[in-house]
Amino acid sequence: MPTKRSQTPPIEPASDAKPKAAERIRRTARELFYREGIRAIGVEEIVTRAGVTKPSLYRSYASKDELAAEYLRDYEVAFWKVFEAGAQIHPDDARAQLMAYFEGLAQRATQAGYRGCGLTNAVVEYPGDEHPARKVAEEHKQKLRERLIELSTAMGAQDPALLANGLLLLLEGTYSSGQLFGPHGPAESLVKVANQLIDASLR
Amino acid sequence: MPTKRSQTPPIEPASDAKPKAAERIRRTARELFYREGIRAIGVEEIVTRAGVTKPSLYRSYASKDELAAEYLRDYEVAFWKVFEAGAQIHPDDARAQLMAYFEGLAQRATQAGYRGCGLTNAVVEYPGDEHPARKVAEEHKQKLRERLIELSTAMGAQDPALLANGLLLLLEGTYSSGQLFGPHGPAESLVKVANQLIDASLR
DNA sequence: TGACAATGTTACCGATCGGTACGTACGATT
DNA sequence: AATCGTACGTACCGATCGGTAACATTGTCA
């Protein structure tokens, strides 16, 4: 549905500046979807908590499924920001960059109430591949895998694809384990284990 | 072949022998809950597919939540059967026993349509800790962790708890990755990576 | 000021959710 | 024959699901 626009562009460089209600819905949905799960949260609760009403939601988002997909797109943006944050501090050290993310993740994943990766969770909630949210998640994980291969190559791994696979298993395992076990779950050991694996991969 | 059906079952210990309808419900629920997720399946669909009616379900199970918990208890029994199957073939080799499970898992997790671990999925579906299904899952994961520590000790790991944590991360990562990636996901590398990790843990 | 489009609100839709009151078919006991 | 316990089905409940039609309000321009 293309909407007419470009009539009020003086401030806000982003041409499609979201109206207030849509943005509140977006933020509320993001928090509730992540914390409680997508299926567990009805649109009624979203709009109530956002202080708006349902038609406001459906004017900005075609359906709940699309809102969920949008939530995951936002989630992905936030993910990459955190993931690549280490590149600023360690510009030429792929290993240090990766471990910076791992250290932060290990801390988060051993906090009470940790809910894992929103993208992974969405795939668990929607097994059929027809759901728009699932596509966002699957494409993201492919990108993540490719990025890990890049980093593994930069680290000098003998078999970068193999190391990337191993790191990915540890990552996803941390997301799950963080939810399954309490504050003293196996995610505590993520950094040590990852270092062992990287050492072994370098020979 | 007798013309008339025989009378009350002489075998089957009296205590609480399940009637026919309850067992069909149980099996149907197990398949649907695992394949589609618990929240995605309504009781109506379960009883329809099982060829029974709702009151039959509620006579044997207090609620859908309880049926879900029962499904996970069955799932756990099946899990341990597979997990400990390697002990028959390799009675005195903890490493070989564990790797036998890992090899089978890696194969399953790289099949199209793989759905991961039913227990882990249930925790993702029910973040709040009040749900009976979640308790079953959490207790199971604790047992699994303890078992992995036992096996790590038997393998002669320098730090058995650390190795167990690493193996658990790989396991959970395989469950997730099997769903996230297709047939050529990182679960393909599970065996190699696990071997690297075990080697490193033995020093 | 007046016109217009964008946004917000009230009230409602059919479908489905988990769950249940109540009647019935049937074999065993007396 | 009368009765009882068991197992099952018919028909329905209120609540909630995702989604929408119709109307009121607002801000921004001419």
Image (cartoon, coloured by chain):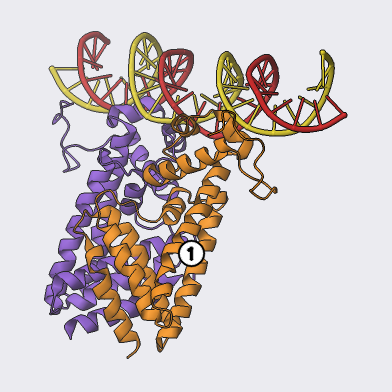
Chain colours: A purple, B orange, C red, D yellow
Q: Give the percent coordinates (x, y) of residue A202.
A: 17, 83
Q: In the picture, which quadrant includes the C terminus of chain A?
A: bottom left
Residue A134 lies in quadrant? top left
Placement of B64 over or under B147, stated as above or below: above
Q: Is residue B166 visible?
A: no
Q: In the picture, which quadrant includes the N terminus of chain A?
A: top left
Q: Give the percent coordinates (x, y) of residue B104.
A: 31, 64
For the point 44% across and 68% down, which residue is it? A110
Nearer the observer, A23 or B6? B6
Nearer the observer, B53 or B40? B53
Q: Give the percent coordinates (x, y) of residue B22.
A: 56, 38
Q: Is residue B141 visible?
A: yes
Mark 1 packing: few (<14 Cα in 10 Å), some, or many (20+)? some
SS for callout 1: helix
Q: Is residue D2 left or right of residue B58?
A: right
For the point 67% across and 45% down, which residue is it? B10
Residue A8 lies in quadrant? top left
Residue D5 lies in quadrant? top right
Q: Give the percent coordinates (x, y) of residue B27.
A: 47, 43
Residue on which the image places disc 1? B141
Q: Is residue A123 left or right of residue B59?
A: left
Q: Amino acid at mark 1?
A: Lys
Placement of B147 over or under B65, stated as above or below: below
Q: Is residue D18 left or right of residue B147?
A: left
